[in-house]
């Protein structure tokens, strides 16, 4: 979706606020939101792409106003409701609905190390023919889907060069909507800064973007 | 500590909200209510949340990445493996998993400077750098890193020569990037552990160089 989350190249966002000796979490609730998002994610009711898309759907003014973990809190709450794990009534009352059964087992502390060690593998060991190869000139498609996509707006309809083939990965544009994994090749594509930004950019500079096969067409 | 953006650093000596709009107690209550509902329903185990927080507050952080960098500086064969298959080479040192499943390492040289960003969200190599700092996830950095990388670097106190090629890596997919900074001149006599102590988080994102403190230079 063409949301405010897709902010590469926007002006007016201000200077970078750097914090020395920054703590991992700035308040106890931040850590709890981080952890409960990961723990609830272990139920596998939604993908990481679905969670990202949920964050993208926060209205633009809110998206810019909320702190990072507030966005996570909003998104994980929505995902929990959409997936049926909790209801809006339960959220409001803070209590499980009368007669609701306690589900189990939740992720335990003992399972945390193994969960983090394995992570979530997005690559797929399936044979898919790559449409492009390293060294090939390509152009990104000019697509404007209302759903989730990982092709940033600043790089749409732009010429670039495939630098390497990363292999086959699930496709976020479909996975985020609980549709097929649609596994396909992901390439590192080099865009000259001048092609993206015009003469104001240094002729030496470049932006490398990891792009799925479906985002590209031959130049 | 590497050079922060000029004039915009502040020490963390008080609990505050970065966007300055929300009363923290409201959030504390909201999160407590959600956590307790989830616990009552059996959807989460509070001890698992404690374990997750503990892991990222105490264990997984930029010291991991620093060890990877130091090893690459002292061991050319390791460095080769790092470029051939970063995920496996990093796993040799015991790091991997969540948000480090698919790793790539890009090397800074006198000719090329690499900078990592995620313009769309906050993708970051947790397994080697821990959770990202607020500035990395913020609108100013995400918006500007791709259109004005030299200006961003200047704000971090890093002025690059015009002939240096700047490569910005926008982490749009599930590949996660670690910058291998240049080994600082004068560090030839330092051993791997001493080198690892020099390597900062910022240098592995690409917003700083690794510098040799005067004292370390004197020792070497």
Image (cartoon, rainbow, N blue to C red):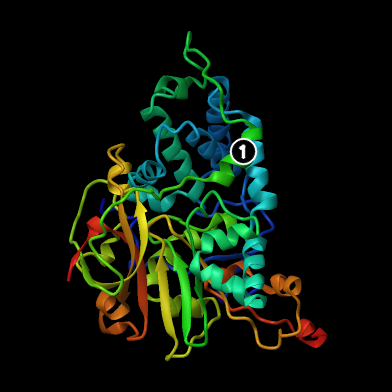
Question: A135 or B117: which is nearer to us?
Answer: A135
Whether residue A28 can be seen here = no
B48 w.r.t. B130: above or below? above
Is residue B196 visible in the rendered structure shown here? yes
Query: Could you say which is closer to the camera, residue A176 or residue B33?
Result: A176
Position of B103 relative to A106 (above/below): below
Residue A102, horizontal then vertical, whole percent: 53, 16
Per the image, the residue denoted by label 1 is A112
Image x and y of residue A26, in percent? 61, 50
- Residue at coordinates 54% horizontally, 20% vertically from top-left? A104
Give the left or right position of residue A4, taking residue B115 as reference. Answer: left
Nearer-the-camera pick, B158 or B31: B158
Position of A210 compared to B103: left or right?
left
Name the quadrant of the N terminus of chain B: bottom right
Q: Position of residue B21 (x, y in %)?
A: 49, 49
Q: Residue at x 58, y 37 (%)?
A: B28
Q: Residues within 10 Å of mark 1 (few under 14, many from 20)?
A: many
* Residue farthest to the front, as pictured: A127
Total residue callouts: 1
Q: Could you tell me which chain the residue with mark 1 belongs to?
A: A
- Residue A165 occupies which quadrant of the picture? bottom left
Q: Quadrant of the C terminus of chain B?
A: bottom right
| A137 w.r.t. A122: above or below | below
The image shows residue B3 at horizontal and vertical percentages of: 61, 76
Residue at disc 1, secondary structure: helix
Residue A194 found in image quarter? bottom left
Q: Residue furthest right?
A: B219
């Amino acid at each position: 979706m063409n949301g405010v989350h897709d902010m590469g190249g926007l002006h007016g966002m201000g200077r970078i606020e750097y914090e020395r000796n920054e703590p991992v979490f700035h308040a106890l609730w931040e850590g709890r939101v981080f952890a409960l998002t990961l723990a609830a994610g272990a139920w596998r009711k939604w993908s990481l792409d679905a969670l990202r898309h949920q964050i993208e759907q926060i209205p633009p003014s809110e998206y810019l106003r909320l702190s990072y973990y507030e966005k996570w809190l909003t998104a994980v709450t929505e995902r929990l409701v959409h997936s049926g794990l909790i209801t809006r009534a339960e959220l409001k009352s803070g209590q499980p609905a009368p007669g609701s059964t306690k589900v189990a087992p939740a992720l335990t502390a003992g399972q945390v190390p193994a969960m983090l060690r394995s992570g979530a593998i997005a690559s797929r060991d399936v044979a898919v023919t790559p449409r492009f190869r390293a060294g090939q000139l390509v152009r990104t498609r000019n697509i404007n889907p209302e759903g989730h996509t990982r092709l940033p707006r600043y790089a749409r309809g732009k010429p670039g060069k495939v630098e390497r083939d990363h292999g086959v990965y699930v496709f976020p544009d479909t996975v985020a909507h609980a549709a097929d994994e649609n596994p396909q090749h992901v390439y590192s594509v080099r865009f000259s800064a001048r092609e993206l930004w015009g003469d104001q950019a240094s002729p030496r500079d470049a932006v490398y973007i990891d792009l799925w096969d479906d985002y590209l067409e031959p130049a | 500590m590497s050079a922060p953006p000029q004039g915009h650093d502040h020490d963390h000596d008080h609990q505050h909200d970065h966007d300055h709009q929300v009363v923290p107690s409201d959030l504390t209550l909201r999160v407590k209510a959600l956590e307790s509902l989830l616990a009552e329903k059996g959807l989460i185990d509070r001890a698992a949340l404690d374990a997750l927080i503990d892991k990222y507050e105490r264990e997984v952080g930029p010291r991991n990445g620093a060890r990877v960098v130091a090893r690459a500086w002292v061991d050319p064969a390791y460095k080769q493996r790092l470029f051939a298959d970063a995920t496996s080479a990093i796993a040799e040192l015991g790091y991997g998993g969540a948000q480090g499943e698919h790793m790539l390492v890009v090397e800074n040289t006198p000719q090329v400077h690499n900078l990592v960003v995620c313009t769309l969200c906050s993708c970051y190599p947790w397994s080697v750098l821990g959770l990202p700092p607020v500035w990395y996830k913020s609108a100013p950095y995400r918006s500007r890193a791709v259109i004005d990388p030299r200006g961003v670097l200047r704000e971090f106190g890093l002025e690059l020569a015009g002939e240096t090629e700047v490569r910005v890596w926008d982490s749009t997919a599930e590949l996660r990037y670690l910058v291998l900074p240049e080994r600082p001149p004068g560090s030839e006599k330092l051993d791997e552990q001493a080198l690892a102590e020099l390597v900062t988080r910022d240098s592995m994102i690409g917003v700083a160089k690794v510098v040799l403190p005067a004292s370390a230079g004197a020792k070497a």
